Image: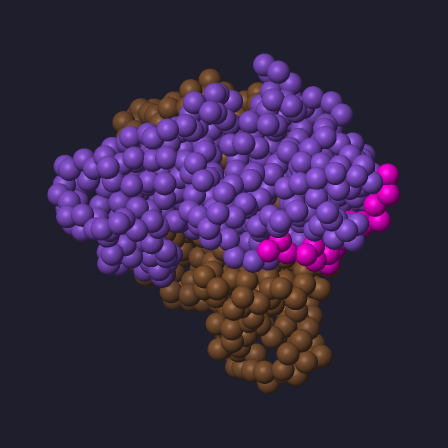
Chain colours: A brown, B purple
Amino acid sequence: MPPKHITIRGRCPRGRAAVRLGSDVPSNTAYIVSRSVFIQLDGAGQLVAANSVSRSPCVLEEDDLAILRAFSHARTQEAALHTVRQERSLSPEAFAQAVERLRGNNILTPVRADYRAEDSGYVPASTGFASFALHHWMLRDSVRVMAYRSAILPHVRDKVVADLGCGTGILSMFAAQGGARHVYALEESEVAALARMMFRANGMEDRVTLLTGNSKDIQLPEPVDVIVHEILGIDPFFENVIPYIDDARRRFLRPGQGTLIPHKIEVCCVGVEPEFVPSIAHRARLEAREFSGMYGLDFSPYLHVLEQADEINDDATFPRRANDFRVGFFEQAILSEECVVRTIDLAGDLEAQTAGETLSSLKIRAGGRLGSLLMFFRAHLDDRLVLSTSPFSPRTHWGWAVRDLPRALSVNAGDEITLTSSLLTVAGRQKLKVLPK
Amino acid sequence: MPPKHITIRGRCPRGRAAVRLGSDVPSNTAYIVSRSVFIQLDGAGQLVAANSVSRSPCVLEEDDLAILRAFSHARTQEAALHTVRQERSLSPEAFAQAVERLRGNNILTPVRADYRAEDSGYVPASTGFASFALHHWMLRDSVRVMAYRSAILPHVRDKVVADLGCGTGILSMFAAQGGARHVYALEESEVAALARMMFRANGMEDRVTLLTGNSKDIQLPEPVDVIVHEILGIDPFFENVIPYIDDARRRFLRPGQGTLIPHKIEVCCVGVEPEFVPSIAHRARLEAREFSGMYGLDFSPYLHVLEQADEINDDATFPRRANDFRVGFFEQAILSEECVVRTIDLAGDLEAQTAGETLSSLKIRAGGRLGSLLMFFRAHLDDRLVLSTSPFSPRTHWGWAVRDLPRALSVNAGDEITLTSSLLTVAGRQKLKVLPK
């Protein structure tokens, strides 16, 4: 993937270990460069290493590349230092400091460590999803959590399950509640310590194994039947769901019969302009389009009846509740039909589905000044249930992403605007760029 | 229960039948006084008949009582007219009009009607929960719907299920999705026509039987293993859940082994005063208390960690999302601990649990002017999952009920206010009255 011209400010943060899982590393531990690391040349000509959503990308320092080369096959520190000093003069102290920094950022990671043990030598990330505040936002989003619970329960009985990026462990615990034979909960940040406490508090330690580390570096002891994952940003690619699923599917999932929850992601948008408040009747009809997916049922009779109903109006039926309809981005006009920019079948050929540019058509239904695209996604949790962040669905913690166009376009009803989308990697994180052609 | 001094305005509404299930009644149909009718003397000395949340209470007219007496055992119109005319002079036309009015309000209801048939003679209610707007509000409340889905799925496989007041049929369809052997969906209002279309659209007609009528008048063809019900108002008694469950439990549920979803209701309150906005950190900690019930898991480690977290603050962590914490009644100070006013075990002795006055203690935690009680409830859907309308939970369509006290009280931290509660019946609907003693 092409390097992106960005400037990375700052250096690798030192591991802050408020909830530290262990730092006493046996001296004979061998390290390897984490499989999750993505190294990219930035616009200033610096090498930037990024490897997860929970660690800031960091600029590699002068000796780092030689050190990483030395560790490119599993090496103890002693053996690696010997290799490095064949080509560079580097003091053992400077080498040890560099290794500690790279290890603290999971650029170097222990080999064959017991990822279950608290003294594995793995340094959990202390930023990103180590934040309890983020997990609180996700936990209070019961639209998200109950959609997953409802999808997980029927698919895990007597199955082996992996939960990628388990966070507080809630989805792993739902899998245990649903009768999973065993659950492997993978987490790279310090929130893993909380997940461990949660499994214990809920009496699930025998069925749920916490593995601390980046999923790309972890070996599971057995194939799994189900992979549960919620590594979705509001740009659903931004937490690198594609490369993580690609790896987990190949190395973890029972070939040919494994289940992914979710198994399909649609990236969608609508075109918007400022200053617009829809009627309550209009909003109700827009929302109702989402019910089929939300609840896994065919709501077409409901939609049909609602289209004909004359009783839904602002003043009579919903006097006290009108404001609930007006939160969020409905201050912005929605000028277009919904446009599906990308559909990714996570069980399919991921490279083919994400490579190159894709064209899609944004159908204008109301004339105006098209200034931004409001982006959202739909995650298909099973064949029926859809978790949607659409502006027409009950609001989730994700909210919506508004991408301003390079310049506003005057549009008329009936116009079709061609959008091009391409998946970029910026500082190791994937991002969908969507623009009018 | 004692008569309540209220004035009922208006007479029985004529059945408006926008979605009519059928009105051609065979002339030999026998009628009986609906078992759901509750007749009460109002403050003006008028007899008021009320029988459901979907029909307005109506004042009985001069000849109505004689007509109801005549139909007090199953009678055809011809036989009843004969009986009435033995004591009163009443023209056949006036009699027929009165019968039609009483029948249209389900005060008279057909006997042994096939409640499955669209020509059963039952007149579905055209008000109350016949409103699509109400159902839209309930459907977009995914906190509510997904809590029920999540609780229903694991408890219905190969079971026979009854859904009291099925509305659009969504909970019945979840039971069918969960593998129920058969589902009986009971609905007294015109929304039943939509439920019928939904069952058809979802290919569930063979497993879901729609029975139109009031549950108290319906005979089920077989005992059920599970009763699913969501006949809960924000005062949870207001849709008469107690008498309906009392009846359904005795007549529908398989004795000794049946399941109620929900099986327990707690009515709660906190004392409030105006003008107060809590910090985000405070609000996060309050909300987190609800997660154990919402998700059926022990969240004590999470709570413990959150208590110690210093990173949740208004300005740094949640700058863009701060408003989400400030919706609703948090403009009012919460001066007290939560107080459970009543706990009703729906599988227990309902009469004993609802009779008389109950005392409870409202513990004041912050001094101020105690002006109102903010009422909410918790419905225990199974042994783990709790659907809560607490102000500390994600908001549901119910919102909260604020009951102003007869006069505001000055309170200090540490005070305990004794509350008395008693269940009244007003115009046929139950209501919990809560007052400081």
**Left or right of residue A61, residue B418 in this image:** left
Name the residue located 45 percent from the left edge and 33 percent from the top edge.
Answer: B1
In depth, the one of A17 and B264 nearer the eye is B264
Which quarter of the figure has residue A423?
bottom right
Name the residue located 22 percent from the left edge and 51 percent from the top edge.
Answer: B407
Residue B70 counted in the magenta span: no
In depth, the one of A212 and A370 nearer the eye is A370
**Left or right of residue A385, residue B319 in this image:** left
Horizontal and vertical percent for residue B189? Answer: 67, 47
Q: Predominant secondary structure in magenta? A: loop
Horizontal and vertical percent for residue B276? Answer: 24, 56
**Left or right of residue B249, residue B289 in this image:** left
Whether residue B293 appears in this view of the structure is: no
Name the residue located 15 percent from the left edge and 37 percent from the top edge.
Answer: B415
Which quarter of the figure has residue B319?
bottom left
In the rendered view, tell whether residue B9 sits above or below residue A192: below
**Numbered marks: total:** 0
Specify the quadrant that holds the N terminus of chain A: bottom right
Which quarter of the figure has residue B221?
top right
Whether residue A5 appears in this view of the structure is: yes
Horizontal and vertical percent for residue A178? Answer: 57, 27
Name the residue located 59 percent from the left edge and 42 percent from the top edge.
Answer: B51
Question: Residue most toward the bottom?
Answer: A410
Horizontal and vertical percent for residue A186? Answer: 47, 33
In depth, the one of A192 and B408 nearer the eye is B408
Looking at the rendering, the stretch of residues picked out in magenta corresponds to: B11-28
Residue B12 counted in the magenta span: yes
Specify the quadrant that holds the C terminus of chain A: bottom right
